[in-house]
Amino acid sequence: MKKNNEAPKFLRRLEKYMPGPNSKYNKKPADFMPGFIHGLILPLTFIYSQYNPVVKLYETDNVGRRYNVGFVIGLIGLIKAISG
């Protein structure tokens, strides 16, 4: 049986929303909403980053506090949604 090292199709579709040089936020620094989205999709980003090392868990080109606050709120929202 042939081993497939390609990421699942649904993760490849989300790549433009994930932090890193291929993200759609590379034109201007990421603000609150991109931070919120990145916090929400962190587990999917982590899985995809194992297939594509260019994808990062955190957008380095951001505006600072507003991105960080959005990221943390998104992460908290994810944890609350998972835990019920």
Image (spheres, rainbow, N blue to C red):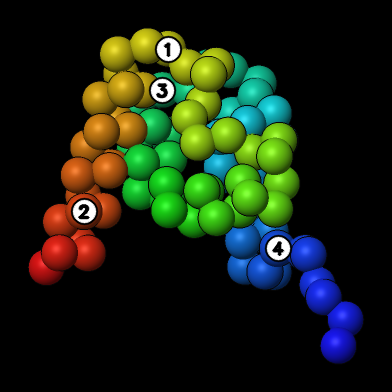
Spot the residue most to the right: 2
Spatial CA span between label 2 and label 1: 24 Å
- Local crowd size for mark 4, using a 10 Å CA cut-off: few (<14), some (14–19), many (≥20): some
Q: Is residue 35 above or below residue 78?
A: above
Task: Kindly report which numbered mark, 2 or 3, lies closer to the viewer in this rendering.
Answer: 2
Regarding mark 3 in the picture, which secondary structure is present there? Answer: loop
Whether residue 14 is visible to the viewer of this picture, yes or no, is no
Give the residue at x 41% y 22%. Answer: 31
Give the residue at x 62% y 68%. Answer: 10
Mark 3, residue position: 31
Mark 1, residue position: 63
Q: Position of residue 58 (x, y in %)?
A: 48, 30
Give the residue at x 47% y 17%. Answer: 62
Q: Amino acid at mark 2?
A: Ile
Spatial CA span between label 3 and label 4: 28 Å
Q: Is residue 7 above or below residue 4?
A: above
Counting residues from the start of the chain, the first of labels 3 and 1 encountered is: 3
Spot the residue most to the top: 64
- Local crowd size for mark 2, using a 10 Å CA cut-off: few (<14), some (14–19), many (≥20): few
Spatial CA span between label 3 and label 1: 6 Å
Q: Is residue 72 above or below residue 76?
A: above
Spatial CA span between label 4 and label 1: 30 Å
Mark 4, residue position: 7
Could you tell me if the residues under marks 3 and 1 are in contact, i.e. CB atoms within 8 Å? yes
Give the residue at x 32% y 33%. Answer: 71
Mark 2, residue position: 79
Left or right: 7, with 82 as reference point: right
Q: Amino acid at mark 1?
A: Val
